[in-house]
Amino acid sequence: MGSGNFKIPGFLFAGISAGIKKNGKKDLALIYSEVPAQVAGIFTTNAVKAAPVRIGMERIKKGVGQAVIINSGNANACTGSQGLKDARKISSLVARGLGINEKLIFPASTGIIGVPLPLQKFEDGVPELIRSLARDGWMNTVEAIMTTDAFPKIAAANCRVKGKSVKLCGMVKGAGMIRPNMATMLSFLVTDANIKASLLQKMLQKAAEVSYNSITVDGDTSTNDTVLLFANGVAGHPRLTHMDRDGEVFQSMLNKVCGNLAKSVVKDGEGATKFVEILVSGAKNREDAKKAAYAIGHSPLVKTAFFGEDANWGRILCALGYSGARIHPDRVDVLFNQYPIVKNGMGVGGKLEEKAGKVLKEKTFRISVNLHQGRASFLLFTTDLSFEYVKINASYRS
Amino acid sequence: MGSGNFKIPGFLFAGISAGIKKNGKKDLALIYSEVPAQVAGIFTTNAVKAAPVRIGMERIKKGVGQAVIINSGNANACTGSQGLKDARKISSLVARGLGINEKLIFPASTGIIGVPLPLQKFEDGVPELIRSLARDGWMNTVEAIMTTDAFPKIAAANCRVKGKSVKLCGMVKGAGMIRPNMATMLSFLVTDANIKASLLQKMLQKAAEVSYNSITVDGDTSTNDTVLLFANGVAGHPRLTHMDRDGEVFQSMLNKVCGNLAKSVVKDGEGATKFVEILVSGAKNREDAKKAAYAIGHSPLVKTAFFGEDANWGRILCALGYSGARIHPDRVDVLFNQYPIVKNGMGVGGKLEEKAGKVLKEKTFRISVNLHQGRASFLLFTTDLSFEYVKINASYRS
């Protein structure tokens, strides 16, 4: 759903170029709610956490927030106590400019690791940033949080909660599956729904499981990954405090929006030419299904074969074999879209195999694996591995 | 040490083109001991095991063998019961030709998965193969087991055991670190030492830990990986049956030869332009050191940065952060060769960082990480990730 002019009552957006990125592109963004909002957040599980993540994790405990200040071009990670000081300083600059409490501000950063933030550029840029806040400033914000992204990624939806129309708008920054990519993923969602922070947090975690967590692995995240959801209540319905039918309606909208954002991250896989769904079913349990799906989705040999449109299903079976999931090689079936290519662990051969192989020529396809060990399944979104990926990541800093 | 003319008493070698590979290169090899030898073997831990691996695992139980028949161009994996039948048929062809018991023959295969072996080519080729057995046929054998290898990989050494001169010669086939590569690794070693199979097995496992297992991860292996060590006893010293001082001398030679073979596999990383040692020290335990080293060595972001000669140490810290090893980000030190680049989790900055960064311009360098958590360490050999890697693996079958 397009959302260039999608306004969310009570929210303002801005994005400017403050000179943090060397190429002069937009690099400083602000999301502001006119009233304090209930906030839910998910942060990286990486043991190395960037300064803004550490501050965000502290501030989210209160469940209230009013603004997010985001910069691209510098991750403020591995910057020690100076990094924390810098991130706090930026919050206070924004707080002063907006006339609100510093604790209501969530900082987020993405970009190069290990380089101190150019603080002066924030001091110079924040006043202009605040001046340019606008109800329809959404696209400026999205542009300013991009790094290696090939296109801006947004999603929006609306539904009715307690008789009121409620809007939800989200943006995400990040390209490619986190592994092999490990690019930082930042996602910000805003809604005018009125939902208590504790419930909002549960809802966000549920949505993440079928979206962001289906493109990455728990623990396998960058130093800066952050997802924040602001609910400012401006829609005016009675506050949702526990899950009910209206909550389910909102949850389902949230799942959809997060799902679309996550898929757009995969589709923007750095240099990716294919969008691939990997569905593992018939696993003993969900953990096994996940292991199997990720072994396939992470295998550079499988991914380069996708890029080469080479129906080398042996690499898929090989990946299953070392995945750690319980398998019986002689029971495994594999389909490319609806076409069987492996039956009972062996190639179907001849014309049938040729037909399945042709699926790889498409831009988007599904690899379905049935382990015939049980009833659990897992759906993973991934891409191929192309020349372009190596090119982008070999020269990221230069 | 060169070994083109390195003969091992009692062993004969052959390698011919039997038409299994489409490009007409050598693809069928034979190693033959004139007398039954004690045999040790290590086979893939992948749950999907190729037919020859399943036969080898069965035959090694007796600890005796006299020949290895190896083909490249076809892995005979995921070929079901027909694959087992085919591998047995080939053993029996060789057994008949050599006039020895079929059970003394170990089959090995590498190449495309899921395609039945072209049995007729073996029937036609085996007699010629046996006719061409020669004491100095070593290089023909090495060439015939190669697939994507850019160069033949051999190592040789000698030592004294119980007063006799003893020779050891080894070859390996495989290119690149197993992950991201997952190419099959085959290694065959022959010695005229006289060592009981049970001791030989222990020695081979010890040697593998500091060689083959330092370029791959347990369980993260292809369908066909096989290491075989034949000791035919022709040197004539009393049989070693348990570890003693002479055993230690042999062990140390074996470690060195296996280590050199393993390193040459990494140096032949598919399209690799850099050979990188990753030394993690100061870990809580060896498991943690291994996790940390592999997180760095497996990270495509780190590997593409090596290729781009970009001293992006933030990616190293990020990989450590999700490795699962116990770390305190603020205690981590990183050196590029002898030059510090990260101290207490932060870049050393300025000229010092520049100096360390220049190390990446070299062909071979060491990344040393000290976690300052304990005393355990692990040394991993790996490569960069280049355009060439994607190219080779996108078009392997075509």
Image (spheres, coloured by chain):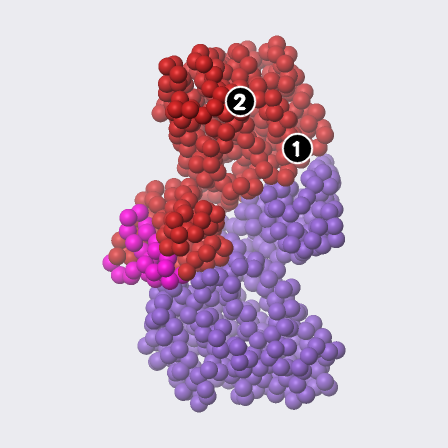
Chain colours: A red, B purple
Is residue B241 among the parts visible in the rendering? yes
Name the residue located 59 percent from the left edge and 64 percent from the top edge: B212
Q: In terms of image quadrants, where is residue A114?
A: top right
A344 in the magenta segment: yes
Percent x, y of residue B350: 72, 36
Residue type (three-letter) at the residue carrying disc 1: Val
Percent x, y of residue A304: 43, 50
CA–CA distance in space, label 1 to label 2:
34 Å
* Bounds of the magenta segment: A329-351
- Counting labels gives 2
Question: Of circles 1 and 2, which is in front?
Answer: 2
Name the residue located 46 percent from the left edge and 40 percent from the top edge: A215
Percent x, y of residue A234: 46, 12
The residue pinned by badge 2 equals A197
Whether marks 1 and 2 lie on the same chain:
yes
Residue, far left: A351
Q: Identify the subunit bearing mark 2.
A: A
Work out whether mark 1 precedes mark 2 in sequence or the reverse, and give the earlier one. 1
Label 2 neighbour load within 10 Å: few <14, some 14-19, many 20+: many
Label 1 neighbour load within 10 Å: few <14, some 14-19, many 20+: some
The residue pinned by badge 1 equals A115
Q: Nearer the viewer, residue A352 or A273?
A: A352
Residue type (three-letter) at the residue carrying disc 2: Ala
Name the residue located 68 percent from the left edge and 88 percent from the top edge: B238
Query: Element under label 2?
Result: helix
Residue B211 vs B375, above or below: the answer is below
Percent x, y of residue B46: 49, 61
